[in-house]
Amino acid sequence: MEEQDYLKTYDQRAYATPLLSVDSVLFTYHEQSLKVLLVQRAKHPDKGKWGLPGGFIDMQTDKTIEDTVMRKLEEKTGVIPPYIEQLATRGNAVRDKRGWSVTVCYTALIAHQNCRVNISTVSEVEWVDSDRLDEVDLAFDHREIIHIARERLRQKALYSIVPAYALPEKFTLPELQHIHELLIGKKLQKKSFRRRIEQADLLHETDEKRALGGRPATLYTMKKSSGSYTFIRNLG
Amino acid sequence: MEEQDYLKTYDQRAYATPLLSVDSVLFTYHEQSLKVLLVQRAKHPDKGKWGLPGGFIDMQTDKTIEDTVMRKLEEKTGVIPPYIEQLATRGNAVRDKRGWSVTVCYTALIAHQNCRVNISTVSEVEWVDSDRLDEVDLAFDHREIIHIARERLRQKALYSIVPAYALPEKFTLPELQHIHELLIGKKLQKKSFRRRIEQADLLHETDEKRALGGRPATLYTMKKSSGSYTFIRNLG
DNA sequence: AAGATTAGTGTCCTTGTGACACTATATTTG
DNA sequence: CAAATATAGTGTCACAAGGACACTAATCTT
């Protein structure tokens, strides 16, 4: 059993391997604006600066990279976001003071109300308005990562309804249109937007309506099977 | 200097980290079909099976992950492909017998004539027809990775001219249309295809023509700045 | 009750693109 | 050498997607 012998004597440490972590850019929609979840770093390097929720793979408990991502996000928000998608992997010799490091980055979306961040008195986790990231001292290359995530989400807003995962289970079309407008960076035509949504046939119209000083808007929910974890499982 | 102390005493080995490698799905167009570069594995695990060109990061010589990708591809083909793009990162506890492993995957395109694979007598590197991969014994999860790469390239064929990087510097529109048809899996309307190309304004018409038993086709080249390494640098 | 405010629709017009017949320029063949 | 064949490339119609924008609808405010 040549192979068996090989497995026995193999020493993983023989290969010098870069530090490997995961990071998530978790977006939500709250108070008319797009927000990103940031965590104040408790340890070196970049202690005190703000960074993305993430961490190292625990090879004992995690069976896939996505397990790590979900575990880390649950630690910060109390729940596993309904939308998680791999964004990109960045790695080089200089992004971390400690030397060569690699991070596998994810984009995630969640309804603001579903997070425990509000309730928790933990001051080291905070939703930051995505237009005010300039004012925040960010660790490592996290500013770039957030920028790439936002750009990718902008593309999604053009031809999908993925941004709906940043809204509560029931939401109105004007709400959905607004988050799309925030992402794309310009006003959209009501009629065109609604035509697209209708054609996609991914939303389910409920009987309920919600009013805010005018004609009440119909509430919609996402139809089942229109996404969530299917994609992430494919990449596991 | 608290931080300095920290850096001094820091031991990277304190974090148990998965085995980390890169893999590339290198496509080309040759003899009317789409081909993928495969390498016969000389070592365990999966010795003797065919796999994607790739390997481990050399933290001494490589400054970014893309350095590793380019180095590994150059070892096999003699040149650095003109198109390289990050595809996805896969990692879990079971894809490699040795235990937890992570691979950062790339899609690359190159003109067949520009490779040294033909000339070299090295039998362990081979272009395999992408429709005949079923007949090949592939290592690890490389069959899945190739499938994901092909699917991504299919998407690109719908709205870009990225597949042109699998052709020689000068190529004809019927050639480009054919590789798009291979990728998409169905015949395209000549007129529609040419309209799209013209509107994109990414090709430069040369004076030369090439005939193969009918009216000669005009040769085109890609306009500068229409891609190549810009993207990969962004992700470095 | 009238105006303001927000939600949603009707309709025209432009643009992108599939379908397909047409023209153009080469090679092959009788 | 002329006609047939093969490949490249264009003209044009029809239909579908989407922008613009004025309209109707249903609530709240004063």
Image: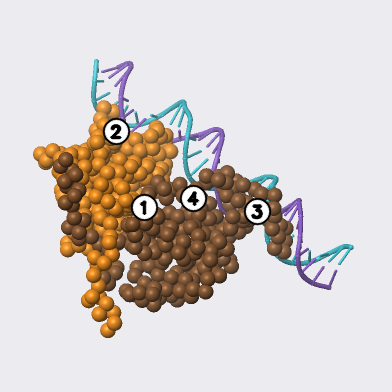
Chain colours: A orange, B brown, C purple, D cyan
Q: Residue at x 26, y 27 (%)?
A: A213
Q: Residue at x 35, y 44 (%)?
A: A148
Does residue A42 appear anywhere in the picture?
A: yes
Q: CA distance from mark 4 to mark 2?
A: 30 Å
Which element is circle 4 on?
loop
Front of the two marks 4 and 3: 4
Amino acid type at circle 4 is Ser
Amino acid type at circle 3 is Leu
Look at mark 4 in the image and give the residue it sits on: B228
Look at mark 1 in the image and give the residue it sits on: B64
Verify CB contact (< 8 Å) between mark 1 and mark 3.
no
Which element is circle 1 on?
loop
Picture quadrant of residue B200: top right
Q: Chain of mark 2?
A: A
Work out whether A159 lies above or below B115: above
Amino acid type at circle 1 is Thr
Q: Residues within 10 Å of mark 1 (few under 14, many from 20)?
A: many
Look at mark 3 in the image and give the residue it sits on: B219
